[in-house]
Image: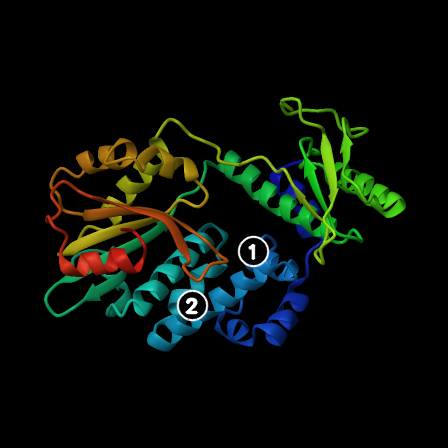
Amino acid sequence: MNYEQILAQYTDTYLDINQCQKMLESRWSTLARLLPPKWWYESSPIRQWLNYSDNEVYETALNLFQDELLLISTRFPDHYKTWIGSISIPEQFWAKRFEAAVIYLLIHGKIDIQALDVKSDVSNNDVDIVIGDGTERIYIECTSVRNPPVKAELQEINRHVEDYIIHEFNQIPGSYLVTCNVLPNFLDKSAVDQFIDIFATFIQQVRPVNEVRWDQIKGFPTNRPDYGQPAAIITPTHLPIRTRITGFPPQAFVDTSGQALYSKIKRKFGQSRGFSGQRILMIDSSFRPDMYITNFTGFKDDVGRAAEFDKNHQTFSIITLSQINIQSERRLFMGTSFPMPWTPTPLTPLARRILEATYMI
């Protein structure tokens, strides 16, 4: 099966467009009004959040996103419909989601955003956010880095499959914590359903009152190093919470080549020329935590190499890396900033306020 067929095994179980719209209008009426008419597509994160909105994580994600769009639409009523349009493009969703979080935090930090999506007077380039305080002007460009296509597709599949498994375990009567060191093949939904059914049948028939350890799960050979750990542990919690599963492996997809972030920064250099004034590039690394780990220790690797590429010092004075937290009022975490060698020291007052408002320093 190809990527679309594998993913469809799971997204085909989701709420359809009419069901999603009905739920939005019932529970998130403001969000329903603020989303573009064609926001829906099969693997849309918004559709996924609605489908699993009984999970507190996604209920919160929808509430926070609604708050952001309401604030932005109120602040920029004339430009809002144009600004929000790209949320319906799969390749641009997370960059726009990141930009929404940044704008929200800046407004709450009482920083004067003068305009969004401003075109250069001397080129066809544009920049996401323009900020001024009467004495200086700063341009901010927001973007999100993703994996190369094959890895990005696998990461997308894993994201949907993990939510599906978590949801199905939540439906098992009782309150149990299931810890697994063996997992099914995510690419085959029939194997995933068989895996879930083994636990559901056992729990419903046995109703264990003490911890149960399985050395193996019938039909599912150990394909990960177990380090002496059992294949699964089923623990009664005796708490008023639903049955849940843990044990998913991390999906960092570490790319030690260092090319992806470097290439992204170089492209943004070209797109952001034509503006006179200080510029800040903010990068969401939620889907590439390896980039953060590679660069966070200092001005080095991808960021440093990209800075060397900007020989005339005509583009970004500061580059930041952070990640989105869709269930936190804080919204961004693990923020760090990389002033370029030619950036004024100390940082200008407005630049410092921007970095503080977005948790980059």
Q: Is residue 39 visible?
A: no
Q: Is residue 334 above or below residue 293?
A: below
The reply to whether discs 2 and 1 touch (Cβ–Cβ < 8 Å) is: no
Q: Is residue 80 visible?
A: yes
Q: Residue at x 49, y 60 (%)?
A: 88
The residue beneath circle 2 is 68
State which quadrant residue 205 falls in: top right
Residue 44 is marked as 1
Residues packed near mark 2 inside 10 Å, few (<14), some (14 to 19) or many (20 plus): many
Q: Earlier in the sequence, mark 2 or mark 1?
A: 1
Query: Residue 31: horizontal and vertical position, in percent?
Result: 52, 71
Instruction: Please give left or right for residue 288 compared with residue 248 in the image.
Output: left
Q: Residue at x 72, y 53 (%)?
A: 13
Query: Residue 138: horizontal and vertical position, in percent?
Result: 19, 59
Mark 2 is on which residue type?
A: Glu
Q: Is residue 305 above or below residue 350?
A: above
Q: Is residue 20 above or below residue 6?
A: below
